[in-house]
């Protein structure tokens, strides 16, 4: 009597989360979703290097980017290197900082609310903006929706520091109140494999070296 073979589980989908490159206000202001912020010269060079690293992969199935200029300008050289069109997705947008948009970070750090932002972000909503929990839900939902279009593939998603930190925390099973402990530098690449089980975080805040060996062990 022959036995029916159990089919192998589907291959994991590899998601590369790329933060946009450096801008003239990086580390100084909270630009949020305000339009008109472009990459600095250093950011352009960072984006070029990130594109080289990603282009060295055997295959990439799709490139998505936040609509903001700094994300699109970071995604553009990746698209050129791969000969692929960059698709824009609003789910990858920066957090909506509301009334804090454009404020100087050194001024925000003096506010009593800043301690809540750092130590208990799940309880905080930006005035007339998003809560961190809403941001995380939006970002994770976008990742799930986009990766579902490319099962078993490799998908590049260019976004922003806080949404990527929140997505990495979610993939790790880490509470959002601890997500500020994760560092996501400009043009860094974080990789998560999504398969039939829990997500597997393969690298976080990678800024150099080969990506070819990124796979679940």
Image: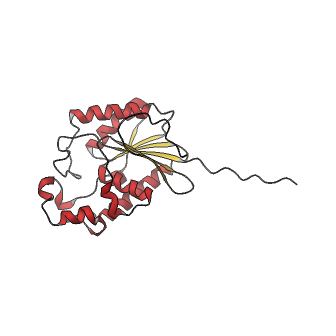
Residue 132: quarter of image: bottom left
Q: Quadrant of the N terminus?
A: bottom right
Is residue 31 depicted above or below 131 in this figure? above
Q: In the displayed image of the protein, which residue is found farthest to the right? A: 1
At 17% across and 44% down in the image, what residue appears? 25
- In the rendered image, which quarter is residue 124 located in? bottom left
Horizontal and vertical percent position of residue 129: 24, 63
In the rendering, at what x and y percent does residue 190 appear? Answer: 40, 45
Lateral position of residue 51 relative to residue 22, left or right: right
- Residue 137 visible in this rendered orientation of the protein: yes
Q: Is residue 150 visible?
A: no
Q: x, y percentage for residue 71?
A: 30, 43
216 or 70: nearer the viewer:
216
Q: Is residue 127 left or right of residue 142?
A: left
Nearer to the camera, 161 or 36: 161
Q: How many marks?
A: 0
Determine whether, in the image, residue 205 is placed left or right of residue 13: left
Residue at the image position 48 percent from the left and 50 percent from the top:
147
Name of the residue lying farthest toward the bottom:
123
> According to the image, what is the colour scheme of the structure?
secondary structure
**Up/down of 208 relative to 32, above or below:** above
Residue 161 image position (x, y, % from top left): 30, 50
Quadrant of the image occupied by residue 40: top left
Residue at x 48% of width, y 37% of height: 60
């Amino acid at each position: 009597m022959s036995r029916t073979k159990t089919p192998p589980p589907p291959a994991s989908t590899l998601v590369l989360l790329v933060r946009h490159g450096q801008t003239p206000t990086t580390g100084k202001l909270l630009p949020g979703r305000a339009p008109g912020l472009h990459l600095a010269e250093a950011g352009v060079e960072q984006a070029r290097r990130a594109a080289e690293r990603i282009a060295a992969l055997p295959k990439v199935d799709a490139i998505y980017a936040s609509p903001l200029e700094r994300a699109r300008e970071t995604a553009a050289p990746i698209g050129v290197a791969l000969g692929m069109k960059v698709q824009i997705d609003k789910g990858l947008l920066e957090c909506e900082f509301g009334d804090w948009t454009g404020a100087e970070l050194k001024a925000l750090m003096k506010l009593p609310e800043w301690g809540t932002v750092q130590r208990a972000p799940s309880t905080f909503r930006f005035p007339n903006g998003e809560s961190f929990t809403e941001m995380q839900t939006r970002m994770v939902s976008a990742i799930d929706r986009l990766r579902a279009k490319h099962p078993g593939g490799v998908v590049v998603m260019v976004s922003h520091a806080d949404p990527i930190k929140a997505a990495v925390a979610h993939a790790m099973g880490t509470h959002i109140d601890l997500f500020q402990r994760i560092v996501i530098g400009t043009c860094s690449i974080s990789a998560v494999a999504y398969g039939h089980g829990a997500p597997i975080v393969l690298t976080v805040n990678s800024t150099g070296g080969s990506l070819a060996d990124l796979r679940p062990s």
